[in-house]
Image (tube, helix red, strand yellow):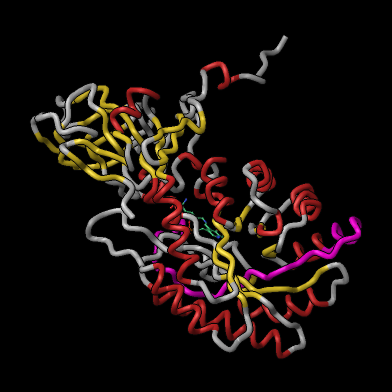
């Protein structure tokens, strides 16, 4: 579902005109569509109806409480990677029994909090983590449910910064050590082995590497079971890409889910998925305003009031986001590099964009619902933008713009 549409020259999200959101709440401002988030989550859940499954939204993609609350109400599970994310899920009304905890560096405090909350499963990424988890669970008088994240050594064919399934990176347990790690886990008194998982990367647009990983992990699950260690669930992580530009084709969610269900038939394994981007990516936009057109250089620059501090994806991954004016105002068209005010040459939101804009005009940076606000920073002492959730004809501010005072509250000067 595309969250925005142009109607009579203006951009709309559900029943709300985005230009109205920009004037009411100011820019830069993230805006999300409740209907688009719900539709994306349901496309997973509906395709898996009839199979024992849990869709665990990857909180890191967008952790605003309103997003988490909407998903909690649908019965979603959550994939977390920190104690902060666990606290957010609980604050949003998500249930701990539907939480799985991923990540290579879980601290003692984070493990303790997750055990106390009673989460569904720890996705363990190393042998030392198994030992730490066992010790903490023992001290708390609990048994920790664990799944081992194995590294299937599959090339996700995505940007190297967001590719995680190959041998040489820090994630998961190497495929050839997996059986030994399962033996270790099964021998630790305070652990209960429940599953196996993998996650090979993000923004994957080709189903082949996902299928390859599925195959390798299913085979490994059978080999683990053959050693007398029963495995109840398989977790295939997230990674399904979305369409950022016209010429891209996203993997059809229903098709992928049906392929997984077909492969798992007869294995007795239940299924967990951890989609992040596929649920929120195309459900959000970043609104901004043109400050200046700088035309005296060899390139034409549109300097806008959003930057790499609010949306770092173009600077970090050379990611492409659509950029469109909020209204069609009859301005002359020209090619621009759309850049922010931050003092870095990499502070670029889009290059060579044909746009009909003038100073003061509102623009939308599209497909910014995932890894936008969640990766924002205060670089250059820029307050974080506000966030708005559109729900039918309502636009509700779900996080106010950060104040300048909040930027350094808690800091101190020396006597
Ligand atoms: N599960 C695990 C263990 C993960 O590491 C991730 C993402 C996900 C699930 C969710 O993946 P998704 O469905 O969203 O692809 N900041 C980058 C993406 C980093 C992804 C990190 N891990 C970006 O903006 O493209």
Pick the quarter of the image with the N terminus: bottom left
Above or below, comparing residue 255 to residue 137 in the picture: below
Q: Name the residue rendered at 58%, 70% in the picture.
A: 53
Report x, y in % for residue 23: 33, 23
Q: Residue at x 81, y 60 (%)?
A: 132
Left or right for 369, reference 243:
right
Percent of width and height locating residue 82: 66, 49
Image side of residue 390 versus residue 80, left or right: left
Q: As rendered, which of 228 and 152 lies closer to the eye? A: 228
280 above or below 338?
Answer: below
Compared with residue 71, is residue 257 higher up or lower down, i.e. above or below?
Answer: below
Q: Nearer the viewer, residue 197 or 261?
A: 261
Return the residue nearer the eye: 287 or 70.
70
- Residue at x-position 48% and y-position 37%: 376
The residue most toward the front is 393
Q: In terms of depth relative to the viewer, which is nearer, 381 or 258?
A: 258
Percent x, y of residue 282: 37, 51
Query: Is residue 149 a member of the stretch shown in magenta?
Result: yes
Q: Where's the C terminus, which quadrant?
A: top right
Q: Please state if 320 lies on the left or on the right of 222 as rendered.
A: left
Q: Quadrant of residue 169?
A: bottom right
Q: Is residue 372 magenta?
A: no
Residue range (magenta): 134-162
Q: Position of residue 191 (x, y in %)?
A: 81, 69
Q: Is residue 223 left or right of residue 198?
A: right
Residue in the picture at 17% in, 30% down: 357
Say how many tags the image has. 0
């Amino acid at each position: 579902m595309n969250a925005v549409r142009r109607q009579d020259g203006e951009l709309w999200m559900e029943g709300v005109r985005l230009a109205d959101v920009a004037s009411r709440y100011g820019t830069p401002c993230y805006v999300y569509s409740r209907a688009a988030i719900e539709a994306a989550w349901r496309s997973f859940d509906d395709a898996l109806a009839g199979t024992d499954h849990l869709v665990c939204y990857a909180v890191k993609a967008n952790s605003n409480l309103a997003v988490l609350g909407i998903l909690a109400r649908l019965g979603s599970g959550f994939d977390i990677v920190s104690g902060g994310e666990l606290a957010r899920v609980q604050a949003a009304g998500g249930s701990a029994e539907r939480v799985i905890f991923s990540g290579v560096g879980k601290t003692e405090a984070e493990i303790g909090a997750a055990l106390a909350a009673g989460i569904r499963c720890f996705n363990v990424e190393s042998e030392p983590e198994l030992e730490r988890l066992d010790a903490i669970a023992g001290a708390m008088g609990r048994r920790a449910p664990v799944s081992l994240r194995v590294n299937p050594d599959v090339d996700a064919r995505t940007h190297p910064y967001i590719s995680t399934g190959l041998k040489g990176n820090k994630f998961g347990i190497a495929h050839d050590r997996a059986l030994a790690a399962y033996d270790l886990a099964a021998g630790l008194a305070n652990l209960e082995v429940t599953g196996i998982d993998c996650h090979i990367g993000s923004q994957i647009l080709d189903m082949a590497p996902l299928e390859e990983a599925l195959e390798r992990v299913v085979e490994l699950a059978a080999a683990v079971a053959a050693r007398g260690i029963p495995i109840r669930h398989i977790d295939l992580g997230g990674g399904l890409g979305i369409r950022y530009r016209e010429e891209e084709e996203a993997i059809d969610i229903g098709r992928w889910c049906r392929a997984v269900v077909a492969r798992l038939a007869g294995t007795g394994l239940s299924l967990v998925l951890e989609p992040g981007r596929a649920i929120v990516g195309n459900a959000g936009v970043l609104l901004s305003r043109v400050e200046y057109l700088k035309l005296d250089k060899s390139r034409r620059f549109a300097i806008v009031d959003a930057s790499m501090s609010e949306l770092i994806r173009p600077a970090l991954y050379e990611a492409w986001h659509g950029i469109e004016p909020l209204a069609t105002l009859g301005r002359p068209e020209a090619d621009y590099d759309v850049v922010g005010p931050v003092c870095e040459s990499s502070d670029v939101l889009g290059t060579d964009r044909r746009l009909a804009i003038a100073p003061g005009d509102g623009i939308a940076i599209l497909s910014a619902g995932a890894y936008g606000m969640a990766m924002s920073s205060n670089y250059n002492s820029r307050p974080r933008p506000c966030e708005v959730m559109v729900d039918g004809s309502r636009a509700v501010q779900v996080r106010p713009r950060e104040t300048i005072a909040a930027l350094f509250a808690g800091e101190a000067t020396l006597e």
